[in-house]
Amino acid sequence: MKVCIGLSGGVDSSVAALLLKKAGYDVFALFMQNWHDTAGTLHGDCEWEEDRFVAEMVARKIGIPFYFVDLSGEYRKRVVDYMFEEYSKGRTPNPDVLCNREIKFDAFMKCAMDLGADFVATGHYCRKDEIMTPDGRRIFRIFAGTDPNKDQSYFLCQLNQKQLSKALFPIGDISKPEVRRIAAEADLPSADKKDSQGICFVGKVDLPVFLQQKLKPAEGDVVEVYDAYFQDNAHYHFIEKTLQDLRRDGENAPVEMVTTYISETKSLKVNDPLREKGVRGNPDNEGGCSSPGIFDKKKIASLSDDDIARLSEPVQYDLSFETETYRSGKKHVKKTRYKENPYGKIIGKHDGAQFYTIGQRKGLNIGGHKDSLFVISTDMETNRIYVGEGHTHKGLSRSCLRIQPEDVHWIREDIPMQTGEIRRYRVRIRYRQPLQDAALVMRSNGLFILFDEPQRGITAGQFAVWYDGDEMVGSGVIGG
């Protein structure tokens, strides 16, 4: 059987190639170049040139043929142009997910097959198997990698059955330290090479500078939103009341409206399950969730399509600021200032709302606050960004999101949800996030994900991915 290994020059794909060769496969390496430009890259050099040099040395060391293909035209059209378009709409795309769906397991896979490959292998930390359905169909399944600290299944969340049928993941059952050990023992040139960072095949970039290749800067206001805004906001109270009403009978404690975690590795709770890195789940509960859940399925089912859609919508910020004139100094110079507003304040300027994303902390360059400021909303029409102070700011957290019907993707195409169906799964809304317990609700107007606990920084354009235990079942683009 002939296998093409996508050899990137990194240690993971190098060890994958070595293991395939040792297993007796007829292996050849294919290196793809996907990017030429250096605009916005922090190192200012063509990173792919060094990667290709290392990959070629690895192939020579292992003793497999080495080929090169330039897919930069496809990459720009199918990944980078998509990025620019999404950012221009105030959404935050995930180029790595798109790169796998559109390039590695599509354009690249076609090149490999044209060279005679039966399968394409990569250095992703994930696992695959196959089952037969009762009606005799062959279904391929994809699972989280054995090493919970390196699980990369999230990035493959948009693959389909045809793509999976031709994919191999040789290091999915191996930990990263073991991969390093194997590489060192085999004296591979990539053994000590650092893991790549930044945008897939572009590298580490200054994102605003990179985006300015097509998106023009435009000065706008940075508005800080105070807690008082939520106290008097009708939509926020609707969400709070609806979540409270959905709780199981006997659950009388006030519903949580603010997330308990600070980042993917830190929590506000001393003993919090989010600190645990395990990916296996609890087989005693539906979808492997850690508990049966706090919300009643019958109560969720009783929500109208309009109400559950409203529940998924983020709070909108429509603050207005009036000006007043005053006299200043000994000469009583006439000046203008904003009147005080109990709900918020204009605290600075930015270069364009399209350059910011929900939950972002860095790059605001605004001082005078005890705690960090976080972006809680961006408004492309007014070119405003709204910020809140501190990890517990109400604007950072949401409990429900919506995926439009056309954006729902089932890896397990044999078990799609039907309209009106509710299932429990474990969900993540970004890579490295610990899996979260949630109820998935399929309606005619979309798939809704209702989390047991509020989530930090739900961002339109990103991918929500759901798992049954450690099997990745489906995914979808978060709407907003």
Image: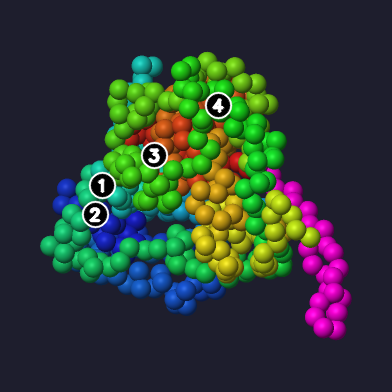
Q: Disc 3 versus disc 4: distance between alpha carbons? A: 23 Å
Q: Which residue is mark 4?
A: 244
* 321 inside magenta stretch: yes
Name the residue: 48% across, 42% down. Answer: 259
The answer to whether the residue labelled 2 contacts the one labelled 1, judged by CB atoms less than 8 Å apart, is yes
Colour scheme of the picture: rainbow
Residue nearest the viewer, comparing 468 with 126: 468
Q: Which residue is mark 1?
A: 147
Q: Secondary structure at mark 2?
A: helix
Q: Disc 1 versus disc 3: distance between alpha carbons? A: 15 Å
User: Neighbour class for label 2 at 10 Å: few (<14), some, many (≥20)?
Assistant: many
Q: Secondary structure at mark 1?
A: loop
Residue 380: x, y in percent?
Answer: 71, 55
Q: Disc 2 versus disc 1: distance between alpha carbons? A: 7 Å
User: Neighbour class for label 3 at 10 Å: few (<14), some, many (≥20)?
Assistant: many
Residue 179: x, y in percent?
Answer: 21, 56
Q: Which residue is mark 3?
A: 435
Name the residue: 21% across, 48% down. Answer: 174
The answer to whether the residue labelled 1 contacts the one labelled 3, judged by CB atoms less than 8 Å apart, is no
Residue 45: x, y in percent?
Answer: 44, 77
